[in-house]
Amino acid sequence: MTDIKAQIKEFRIGQKIRGLRQQKRLTLQELSDLTTLSKPLLSQIENEQVVPPLATLLKIAKGLKVGIHFFFENESSRQKYVVTKKETLREFEAVQRPVINDVSRPYIYHSLAQGMRHKHMEPFLVEFDTCDWDERLFFKHEGDEEFLYIVEGELDLHYNQEIIRLRAGDSIYYDSSQPHGLVAVGQDKAKAVAVLYTKD
């Protein structure tokens, strides 16, 4: 397994957050107030000690008034399109989910449009491990929408009080401002293409 810190450095997410925060002349406490995330967590993310989950990245993006694509784009890129080949989705390019609130997030994600600038959508290939559901896996992000297409395996989407079983070939589009969480079910891991849309 590739060292988690090497994976963080591949995306330089912490550096980008710190740089933009300083550019906007915000203290860690002010960013904490804007995002409802704790100051210690933000510090750990900026120092690349913690890999932020997508929901956390969305909160930070909104607090800093940028799209989530900001964390995955190459500033020098002027491309009009990005092709992501299967063989380029190497293990070291995956961003693994850390332990948040004492719960290990049961998936890793690959950006499928890294390098494309000024995107309105952010597509990911997400790989889910099987695990038992835990209420602490719920999260939400205001004003956003998500689309999920199941490529392999089976997933349970816990959405508010509902549990929706999704199998390979199924898809769902939902308002992600509602509490939601996903876990793979059955014997094998699951894979899905997830597309996040953040409203301005």
Image (cartoon, rainbow, N blue to C red):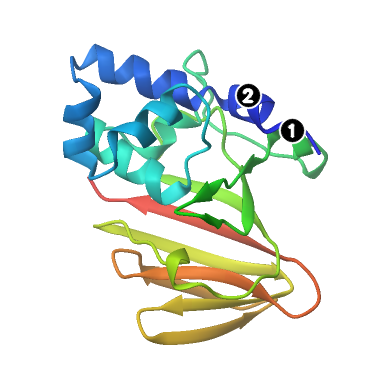
Disc on the earlier residue, 1 or 2: 2
Left of 170 or right of it: where is 53?
left
Q: Nearer the viewer, residue 161 or 176?
A: 161
Left of 21 or right of it: where is 45?
right
Name the residue type under label 1. Answer: Phe
Q: Residue at x 18, y 14 (%)?
A: 25
Q: How many labels, in total? A: 2
Find the residue positioned furthest to the front.
102
> Does residue 120 appear in the picture of this structure?
no
Pick the quarter of the image with the C terminus.
top left
> Does residue 128 appear in the picture of this structure?
yes
Left of 89 or right of it: where is 97?
left
Q: Residue at x 23, y 35 (%)?
A: 32
Instruction: Determine the image quadrant of residue 101.
Output: bottom left
Where 167 sits versus 4, above or below? below
Instruction: Determine the image quadrant of residue 173.
Output: bottom left
Q: Residue at x 69, y 34 (%)?
A: 93
Instruction: Determine the image quadrant of residue 131.
Output: bottom right
Q: Position of residue 149 (x, y in %)?
A: 59, 68
Q: Mark 1 near mark 2, Cβ–Cβ under 8 Å? A: yes
Q: Position of residue 64 (x, y in %)?
A: 25, 30
Pick the quarter of the image with the N terminus.
top right
Name the residue type under label 2. Answer: Glu
Where 89 sits versus 183, above or below? above
Q: Residues within 10 Å of mark 1 (few under 14, many from 20)?
A: some
Left of 172 or right of it: where is 23?
left
Q: CA distance from mark 1 to mark 2?
A: 8 Å
Q: Nearer the viewer, residue 151 or 50?
A: 50
Q: Which mark is residue 10?
A: 2
Q: Residue at x 53, y 66 (%)?
A: 148
Q: Residues within 10 Å of mark 2 (few under 14, many from 20)?
A: some
